[in-house]
């Protein structure tokens, strides 16, 4: 199997995995935001009140959850489009143009950067929240489902640990997959560039051989006696 076909099949498999992992990012985070009544626990801080034992929350910006959700949706859409496009190329046995391959590399690297930013936000933000939870509970997991805030906030804490853990796993795994997809896209670009150079070299060599054959054919048609002086018996005037 040609190298280009192997790379295309690897890209299809990678995008299928990336599609599944993107669901692990925006679905748990969306459920979490809904459960927390539009709030986001990432980077949220506060103090434990001595009077009622509840956590007085100071919510951080909702953008900390909005950004990873948008990144997950974008990864889902792009992976779906890429699976369809690559499947069409494999079915019709077509090759992408050099410009299309170049944009694939640029988009893949851009998505890598966006995904790692989302993964860092989720990880550090969740650690900040858990550091406050462990001030009262032995672990952050035990705080899951506990009544830790005022009922007026209408915050349902049940399931936040598994939701954030799933989103964190999905973000870091997606980053690893998109790094691999970036490598595959770069290899396809290099392979396409080498094939183009090979075709140009073969065309130049073919033209050189054709020109040599034409030159040899022209020289072979010239008379063999060109440049010779007609020979005649020498006449001695003394004879």
Image (cartoon, rainbow, N blue to C red):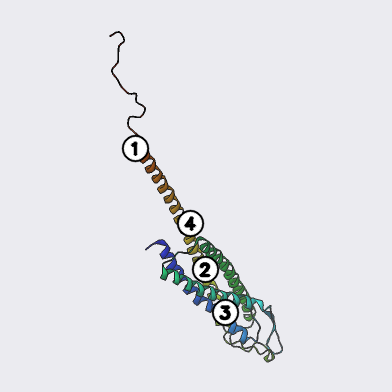
| SS label for mark 4 | helix
| SS label for mark 3 | helix
Residue at left offset 41%, top offset 51%: 202
Q: Nearer the viewer, residue 115 or 87?
A: 87
Separation of marks 4 and 2 at Cα, in angstroms: 22 Å
The residue carrying mark 2 is: 178
Q: Position of residue 71 (x, y in %)?
A: 59, 74
Q: Position of residue 112 (x, y in %)?
A: 56, 67
Q: Earlier in the sequence, mark 3 or mark 2?
A: 3
Q: Position of residue 125 (x, y in %)?
A: 63, 75
Count residues near mark 4 (Cα–Cα under 10 Å), then give few for <14, some for 14-19, many for 20+: few
Can residue 110 be seen?
yes
* Label 1 vs label 3, nearer the camera: 1
Q: Position of residue 51 (x, y in %)?
A: 72, 89
Of the 4 image quadrants, the one containing the C terminus is top left
Vertical relation: 206 (above or below) 83:
above
Q: Earlier in the sequence, mark 4 or mark 3?
A: 3
Separation of marks 3 and 2 at Cα, in angstroms: 17 Å
Residue at left offset 50%, top offset 69%: 177
Residue 201 marker = none
Question: For this view, does 13 lie left or right of residue 169?
Answer: left
Q: Nearer the viewer, residue 67 or 211?
A: 211
Residue 193 marker = 4
Separation of marks 1 and 3 at Cα, in angstroms: 77 Å
| SS label for mark 2 | helix
Separation of marks 1 and 2 at Cα, in angstroms: 63 Å
Separation of marks 4 and 1 at Cα, in angstroms: 41 Å
Question: For this view, does 50 lie left or right of residue 69?
Answer: right
Count residues near mark 1 (Cα–Cα under 10 Å), then give few for <14, some for 14-19, many for 20+: few
The residue carrying mark 1 is: 220
| SS label for mark 1 | helix
């Amino acid at each position: 199997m040609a190298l280009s076909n192997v790379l295309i099949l690897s890209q299809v498999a990678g995008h299928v995995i990336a599609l599944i992992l993107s669901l692990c990012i925006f679905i748990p985070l969306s459920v979490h935001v809904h459960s927390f009544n539009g709030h986001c626990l990432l980077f949220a801080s506060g103090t434990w009140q001595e009077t009622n034992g509840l956590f007085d929350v100071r919510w951080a910006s909702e953008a900390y959850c909005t950004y990873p959700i948008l990144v997950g949706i974008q990864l889902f859409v792009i992976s779906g489009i890429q699976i369809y496009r690559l499947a069409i190329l494999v079915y019709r046995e077509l090759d992408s143009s050099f410009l299309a391959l170049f944009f694939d590399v640029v988009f893949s690297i851009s998505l890598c950067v966006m995904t790692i930013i989302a993964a860092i936000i989720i990880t550090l933000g969740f650690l900040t929240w858990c550091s406050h939870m462990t001030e009262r509970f032995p672990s952050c997991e035990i705080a899951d489902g506990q009544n830790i805030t005022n009922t007026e906030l209408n915050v349902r804490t049940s399931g936040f640990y598994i939701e954030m853990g799933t989103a964190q796993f999905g973000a870091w795994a997606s980053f690893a997959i998109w790094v691999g997809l970036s490598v595959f896209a770069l290899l396809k670009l290099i392979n396409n560039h080498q094939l183009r150079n090979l075709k140009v070299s073969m065309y130049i060599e073919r033209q050189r051989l054709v020109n040599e054959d034409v030159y040899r054919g022209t020289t072979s048609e010239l008379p063999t006696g060109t440049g010779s002086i007609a020979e005649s018996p020498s006449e001695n005037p003394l004879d």
